[in-house]
Amino acid sequence: MKVVNITFKFADGSPDQVLPAVEGESVLDVALNNDIKLQHNCGGVCGCSTCHVYIEAGMDDLPEISDKEEDYIDRAVDPRINSRLGCQCVVQGNEDIVVTIPEQDFLGH
């Protein structure tokens, strides 16, 4: 099983975190398994845009963006050319990935 590192950067200024990721895990899975808050209102099934992230490096190690994912990214706050949904960024295990988590609004928190 291939393992790479995902570096999580945070728009809110929190310190970076570098975590191992196994081939087949999503960026969302790695975040949640390591107590990194990343919204996921639909449960990680590409049904919303709340797990929106920016891929700063390693885009080639992720599956191509689907039309459905692209539609949801268009609804995200401040979408960019490197925007992806964390639930759809499944690690293939060939290169390290750098992700920036944008500012998030957690209702009721």
Image (spheres, grey):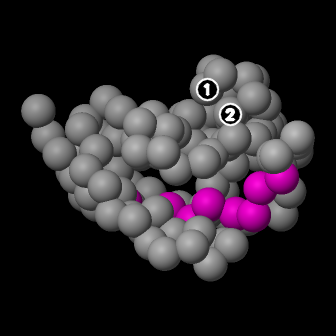
Q: Which residue is drawn at 88% across and 40% down?
A: 108
Q: Are marks 1 and 2 in contact (CB under 8 Å)?
A: yes
Q: What element carries label 1?
A: loop
Tag count: 2
Q: Which mark is residue 40?
A: 2
Furthest-left residue in this view: 1
In this rendering, is residue 22 above or below 78?
Answer: above
Which part of the image, by quadrant, shows the N terminus?
Answer: top left
Residue toward you, 73 or 4: 4
* Residue hosting label 1: 44
Residue toward you, 71 or 96: 96
Q: Spatial distance from mark 1 to mark 2, Cα to Cα?
A: 6 Å
Q: Magenta span covers which residues?
A: 97-105
Percent across and percent down for residue 93 are 23, 44
Under mark 2, the amino acid is His
**Residue 7 in sight in this render:** yes
Under mark 1, the amino acid is Gly
Furthest-front residue in this view: 109
Q: Residue at x 57, y 73 (%)?
A: 14
